[in-house]
Amino acid sequence: MKKETRWFCPCNWTYDPVVGEPSQGIKPGTAFEDLPDTFYCPRCHVDKRGFVKKDLIHDLNVVTSNITAN
Ligand SMILES: [Zn+2]
């Protein structure tokens, strides 16, 4: 089971720290917490204070057993 923290904009755009945000000079591997205060959503231009933190949990075993049951 893998837990992953992602930050969501109200418009549903998600910041992916693996990818970064090249259009704003954010390098791949930059944690959301390390983004500059000037960071904004590239889709709706909300600034980083408008983002909401969510934990995504990937449980591959559950997915596999559901497929088997069907
Ligand atoms: Zn947005």
Image (tube, helix red, strand yellow):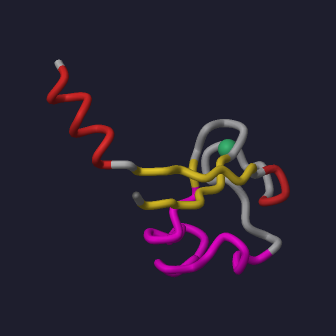
Q: Please report the residue visible at 15 percent of the width from the left and 29 percent of the height from the top.
A: 68
- Main secondary structure type of the part rendered in magenta: loop
Front position in the image: 29 or 53: 53
Residue 61 colored in magenta in the image: no
Residue 44's spot in the image, x, y percent? 69, 43
Residue 67 position by quadrant = top left
Position in image of residue 59 (x %, y %): 38, 49
| Vertical position of residue 54 compared to residue 4: above or below | above
Q: Is residue 26 above or below residue 9?
A: below
- The mark tally for this picture is 0
| Residue depicted at 53% across the width and 69% down the height | 17
Q: Nearer the viewer, residue 53 or 46?
A: 53
Q: Give the position of the C terminus as an image quadrant.
A: top left
Q: Quadrant of the N terminus?
A: bottom left
Query: In the picture provided, is 48 more to the left or to the right than 19?
Result: right
- Measured as percent of width and height from the top left, residue 45 is found at 73, 49
Is 14 situated left or right of 41 in this image?
Answer: left
Which residue is painted at 80% across and 56% down in the image? 47
**The magenta stretch spans residue 19:** yes
- Measuring from the top left, give residue 53's x and y in whole percent: 71, 54
Q: 30 or 3, which lies in front?
A: 3
57 sits to left or right of 55: left
Quarter of image, ligand 1 = top right
Q: Which residues are magenta?
A: 15-36
